[in-house]
Image (tube, helix red, strand yellow):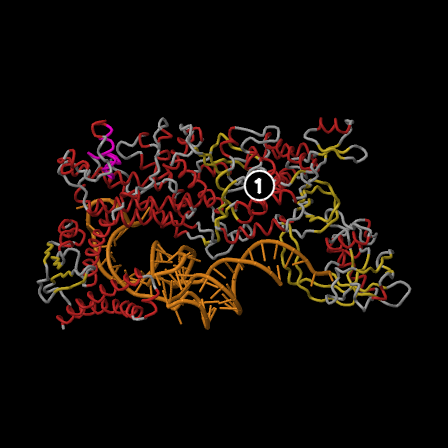
Amino acid sequence: MELEKAYNPTEAESTHYKKWEANSCFAPEINENPNAEAYSIVIPPPNVTGNLHMGHALQHTLMDVLTRWKRMQGYKTLFLVGVDHAGISTQLMVTRQLKKEEHKTPQDIGREAFTEKVWAWKNQYGDTITKQIRREGLSVDWSRERFTMDESLSIAVRNVFVQLYEEGWIYRGNRIINWCPKDKTVLSDLEVKEETKKDGKLYYLQYPVKDSDVKITVATTRPETMLGDTAVAVNPDDERYTDLIGKTIELPLTNREIKIIADEYVELDFGTGAVKITPAHDPNDYEIGMRHNLEQLNVMNNDATMNSNAGADFEGLDRYAAREKVVEKFEELGLLEKIDDYEVVLPHCERCKTVVEPLLSDQWFVNMSEMRDLALNLMRTEGVPHFSPQVPHEKVYTTWLENLKDWTISRQLWWGHQIPAWYDEDGNVFVAKTEEEAIAKAGTKNLTQDPDVLDTWFSSALWSFSTLGWNGDTTETEDLKTFHPTNVLVTGRDIIFLWVSRMAMTSLKFVGEKPFDDVIIHGTVLDKNGQRMSKTKNNGVDPLDVFDKYGVDATRITLADSATGADFAWRDEKVESFRNFANKIWNATRFCLMNSEGAQVDETFLNPKKEVRQIVKTLGSELRELDEEDEEFLDKIVPEFAEDNPKENLSIADKWIISRFNKTAIALNKALGTYQFHEAVQLLYHFFWDDFCDWYIELVKDEITSENINTARDAARSRIITLIEQSLRLLHPFMPFLTEELWHKLPETSNALHNSAYKNADATIMLADFPKGDASMIDEKAEAEMQAIIELISKVRNIRAEMNIKPSDKPAIHIAANGDLQRIFRENEAQILKLARATDLIINESLDVPKASAKAVLTGGAELAIPLEGLIDFDKEIERLENQIAKLDVEGERLEKQLSNKNFVEKAPPEKVEELRARLSEIENQTKTLNENLKSLQ
RNA sequence: GCCGACUUAGCUCAGUGGUAGAGCGCACGCUUCACACGCGUGAUGUCGCAAGUUCAAAUCUUGCAGUCGGCACCA
């Protein structure tokens, strides 16, 4: 079989996903093992309005890597997918469309028609994100796809609301809240972002005290709110104002009189020490107002224009126009003391960036006390959720919970879960799951449902269990039993408070168990200059463009390689290098397939013991008394077997690559188990490229391309193709398309290679058994021997390059070495000659070469020389040797210094001291030899 | 204001007590029968600064500087 010269991802990406999906490979039901352990991940539901960005691609890749890995291990895996209705974003988007297409506002068409439009919009555009998820290759179970406004999830929301209300945790109250005048809705504290404005002003306004000439000066950044002042407060200990406490102020621009009150809240040394109090427009003033029983005068409409309470001169003015006018009037009255430049920090709507106005308003709140304690207790007693990385997230999470305030959950929107509360004509409230129940409770049909909807995060908070069937009416399902708690949540740090904490709380409260064990917090993908990607800066990198350019697999493994929890700057060059890696895998496989006649994928070629077990099984009882772990077992029963069996007859290179493979597999499983994705990718990259391609393939090339058909050649072919097959399995969680594409091209791949949990499924690498790695196949001796061969070849290559020996010139290699090294080099003579591009390998106890030779030393006291009659440039060779001596000298000096330090020798672990001594002795030997070589040239 | 992270080769980043690493880039050489998205060879770092702990510090402690982030906020 001959493959294209380079990997072209397009075809693989367009066919395999469809096949996997059609074969239900993603659903947990594919697992035939009734005792299989479950593994589950729920996706952080992307906004239904959303488009995939690089952050999603990163997060999704990590979840899919874990899911595919566990699935291949035989776990009953569920990667649950779904989208979020995303209240404000979606409503804004549809509102914008309505304005553009029909020049209408939502109010023009009414709630029902508008909501219908949003649903239509959702149905039309809502699958953008799910298409993109398919493109990413995510092995999510589409049969369990959820939407936060699904019927069952909505029932869950209502049940949770009703229960919390009945238990007294949810209440309706009139409090200072964050109001977005543009979106015209209340926002929770978490949806408000502070921004510093450097060119702000601090205005000093003078208020005349009634029946006196005294004026009291207050400082404010928002002069327009003075129209709602209902007091001026001073510190009770402030001697400047002692006489004024209790006096009355004639509030300018209004004909109202307000009191001067004393309150500890006021700081003596800030501003003028006197504070205007506007209980309806400032959270602190509100608190003071409550303490002093002050009137709460709301002077603003919900679009941040002034209302009639502000007086006829101001009514209808925008807050900023009103500010200017108030200042002008104060100036006219001679009551404007001064205006200072002042850096102000203003709250902004996270979504539309409008300055948020603190307003007194009737809203629904959740008192979080009980649920907060449940979550805190879980962390304190079990350390759950376990954050990766633990620092700083565990502490930030805990601290936030400890300081948790009430959650504002109502939103003045139409898109979302409408609050299940009804009012009768007298304003009495009836909270119930359905209107019928509310009617029953109220004893009247004349009820109006609260027009507001719930914060989007209220439904997201239930996501870990509402998606598995819990809705309050139904509290036990097979899925809940099997998949809850989920194993790990993968998400960004921006929603630890908004989402992670709330899932922890609601899950504990309503299901009585944690929602997940682990939480992986990934970093943020920044642009190439280290800036956050944003629409306004237009510096975003579209993952779909990257997929098109470099392929999905290259993008996935690039992202996984970057996942250390730290932010990182996006570089196309990095994907390019992983695209090259994909191509390398493609070509290595291509090469093996060009030489695959007579080969078969068969694990026993990598592990003869497995064959022993098979033979034992076949032969049956007569062999039972023999120890199958005994390495010479086969020799004992059939001596000729070991000699002739090419599976047993392994070269150093074979043993070495098998050892390296098993080490890699073990380390890879460990890295994935501890969420060290970068480590995992590095292991795969270097095993495959450096060990397998650069060395193993080159070492066995001659044998497997041999024209002579014999069992040894076919065994070598089977071995290398089996190594490819096993490597593809290790790579599959990261590069699903490429590995599936290649796997099917390998000879005799079938569902027999599946994990035993998937015996009957159609053949696919995604269900193949994930290699665990066999520690007993690690062969340190073979690795050391191979290291000697690699060192020899590398040194020859170094001489060739530095002495400018043409590739076409093939010199002889002379080696002086001890018995063991002699054997190793002789056994691999053909490979050494090929890879070093030499003609003869002359091995002796000592070197017997002409002066005109280039020389080098090897670890273990061996020497090598390449005679270069007529070719050698003595000056160059001298320089080369001097360079090597200099390098060794630097290291030797440091070691000598360390070893002559008594403290080190006495206090450091003996094995460490011994290690350094051995190294020093090696350096001394090599230096000595190099110096002799150098002298002979001078 | 409080909390925290980061600072390592030209660039992007790994590395958490024992001889400084990768990819890209750079230099030199290669139509070596899988791959130039390749092969071989090489150069490049007082690991932000200062002090401390230790036989030993990129790694632990403290301080400083710079960058970034989270939380809170004084009118």
Image quadrant where one finds the N terminus of chain A: top left
Image quadrant where one finds the C terminus of chain A: bottom left
> Could you classify mark 1 by the number of other residues whose Cα lies within 10 Å: few (under 14), some (14-19), or many (20 or more)?
many
Q: Mark 1 — on which chain does it sit?
A: A
Of residues A312 and A136, the one drawn nearer to the viewer in this rendering: A136
Q: Secondary structure of the magenta portion, mostly?
A: helix
| Image coordinates for residue A415, horizontal then vertical, percent | 64, 37
Q: Inspect the magenta stretch and tell me whether residue A614 lies in it.
A: yes
| A488 sits left or right of A923 in the view | right
| Image coordinates for residue A860, horizontal then vertical, percent | 19, 59
Q: Inspect the magenta stretch and tell me whether residue A407 lies in it.
A: no
| Image coordinates for residue A651, horizontal then vertical, percent | 18, 45
| A291 sits left or right of A927 in the view | right
| Stretch of the chain drawn in magenta | A598-617
Q: Splitting the image into 4 quarters, where does residue A138 fall? A: top left
| Image coordinates for residue A631, horizontal then vertical, percent | 21, 40
- Residue A780 seen in the current view: yes
Image height of A800 relative to A49, above or below = below
Identify the amino acid type marked 1: Met
Residue pointed to by mark 1: A503
| A373 sits left or right of A683 in the view | right
Of residues A874 and A924, the one drawn nearer to the viewer in this rendering: A924
- Residue A524 seen in the current view: no
Q: Splitting the image into 4 quarters, where does residue A707 fall? A: top left
